[in-house]
Amino acid sequence: MPYTYILYSEKIDKYYIGACTDMQRRLYEHNIGHSKFTKTGMPWTIVYTEEFDTLLQAKQRELQIKKMKSRKYIEGLISVR
């Protein structure tokens, strides 16, 4: 199942937005330093997910959230859940 997800790092007090088809595998990759950006914030925790029918839809939603460029918007999404 494709997902759009938001991770949070308490260490650097930042959110990371992404899309994938295997949420557990992707979280594992972030927490072993697979990505240059997320390497600095380990450990990451999942704070928000949305499920989609296709990966394309999940990536479109990822871009929509990123375009908001707003921590308030992200925290609003998280608090609704």
Image: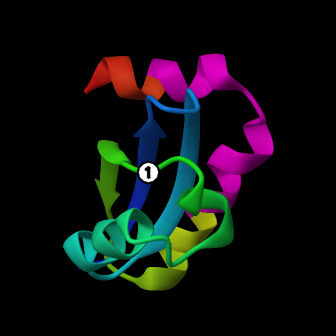
Judge from the rendering whether residue 2 lies leftward or rightward of residue 56; answer left or right.
left
* Residue at figure coordinates x 45%, y 82% from the top left: 55
Closest to the observer: 71 or 68? 71
Say which quadrant the C terminus sits in.
top left
- Vertical side of 47 occupied by 23: above or below: below
Closest to the observer: 79 or 32? 32
Q: Name the dominant secondary structure of the magenta segment.
A: helix
Residue 6 at x, y = what percent? 44, 47
Where disc 1 sits, the SS reads: loop
Residue 32 at x, y = what percent? 38, 71
Please tell me in which quadrant of the rendered image residue 29 appears.
bottom left
Residue 44 at x, y = what percent? 38, 48
First to last magenta residue range:
61-76
Q: Which residue is mark 1?
A: 42
* Residue at figure coordinates x 41%, y 77% from the top left: 20
Closest to the observer: 17 or 35? 35
Residue 51 at x, y = what percent? 29, 62
- Vertical side of 17 occupied by 56: above or below: below
Q: Amino acid at mark 1?
A: Met
* Residue at figure coordinates x 56%, y 49% from the top left: 16
Number of marks drawn = 1
Does the magenta run of residues contain 39? no
Judge from the rendering whether residue 31 lies leftward or rightward of residue 35; answer left or right.
left
* Residue at figure coordinates x 31%, y 44% from the top left: 45
